[in-house]
Image (tube, grey):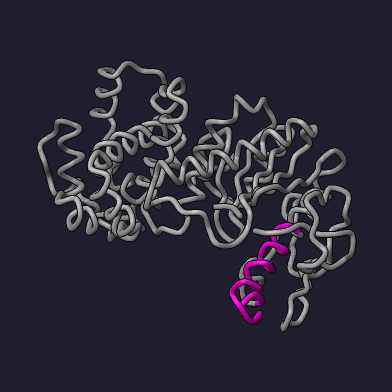
Amino acid sequence: MFKRIVDTFFAPSTAGPSSAISPGNASPDASNAPPPTHIEAPGAQPLHLKALMREENGFPMPDWDAVMTWLATIPGDKEQGVAWGQCELAWLQHLREALGEGYRLRVADQVALLSSKDDASARATLAFVNRARQRIVRTLEGVAEVPGWGYDVVVVFDDHDTYYRYAANHYPEDGEFALSSGMYLGGGCGHFVTVKDRLDTIEPVIVHELTHALLGHLPIPAWLNEGLAVNTEQRFYPQASGAHRGGYEASRQHARHQRFWGPAEIQQFWSGDSFHRPDEGNELSYDLARILTAQFAADWPRFRVFANMADSADGGAAAAREHLGLELGQAVCALLEREYTVAHEPEPGRWRVDATH
């Protein structure tokens, strides 16, 4: 069954042709280098990365927790950051080998691209990601942030079958999830995955998912994360503004929201579960997140503080109360033109139970 995540990537340097990666043997193109078996860093024992990899659906999946434990043994933040970058690139070399002939790993300006794109298309993609990252940080000033360690990692698969087979490794065995054209896969080495297409076709998807990566330092709820990503994507690509509302007219879309969002469904929205629904609730979740976020962000100085303080543990309720001066349940009821009830407020105690139904 297709698995989905709606919702971080990055590192600095590329491996040379030896079986170990160290800061001194980096190069901007590791496409022909053999995958390293271990990573070296000053003041620490070598990390036997290959021994920490398991194979899932034919893809190498490192134990990133073990990698982080090793990083902590390296003296100096700068040295740890360099070593983290080496680990990211080493894993990408192993993934390149698993994907087969034609795939190449290219690195430029803190962006690592694994794909079968030709040289010109790959250079254009790397340059686009770098420009988009800078523009997103300016647009979401004080909220989006480039991580201090690593690369923006982008993996472009040749076909949808490989794309979904890979993505399935990041999701539970059970459950049905919505299809997608791109995903940001967090946990360990966060990275963006998509399917090969013309760059102008996937640019909005890259911007959306790159926004998630640049918000990765914040423990914000899914609705706020997605709201920021959708609004940023639409600000950059207004011609795609109907993508997250199914192309419906505003009045009809509003009626769909009114019919769909009951107390149980709104709890799924606050918890983030509704973004994984395989029905219309998936699309409506993105649209509701877009609307709420746009309204709250109209006063950017206040919103910026809210976004930095919002916590997924309570759906952002406490931060909204303190920094926006409102209750989230009241805001959504006003939007839906519905009489307010406390059942529309985030209730974290219900989420674990509701998520099983």
Q: Residue at x 75, y 52 (%)?
A: 59
Position of 257 relative to 340 (above/below): above
Q: Residue 162 is drawn in which quadrant?
A: top right
Would residue 73 be counted in the magenta stretch?
A: yes
- In the image, 147 versus 138, the foreground residue is 138
The answer to which of 89 and 171 lies nearer the viewer is 89
Residue at 43 percent across and 44 percent down: it is: 138
Write down the region rendered in magenta: 70-89
Towards the viewer: 48 or 87 = 87
Is residue 81 located in the magenta-colored stretch of the structure?
A: yes
Does 201 appear above or below 133? Answer: above
Q: Position of residue 151 (x, y in %)?
A: 63, 54
* Percent position of residue 65, x then y: 61, 70
- In this rendered view, identify the residue nearer to me: 322 or 43: 43
Query: What residue lies at 41% left-to-right and 58% top-to-bottom?
Result: 218
Image quarter where the N terminus lies is top right
Q: Position of residue 332 (x, y in %)?
A: 21, 39
Q: Residue placed at 36% from the left, 18% from the top?
A: 248
Q: Residue furthest left?
A: 339
Q: How many marks?
A: 0
Residue 243, x across and y down, in percent: 45, 25
**What type of secondary structure mainly makes up the magenta span?**
helix
Work out whether 162 lies above or below 91: above
Residue 276, quarter of picture: top left
Q: Judge from the rendering whether residue 60 lies leftward or rightward of residue 310; answer left or right.
A: right
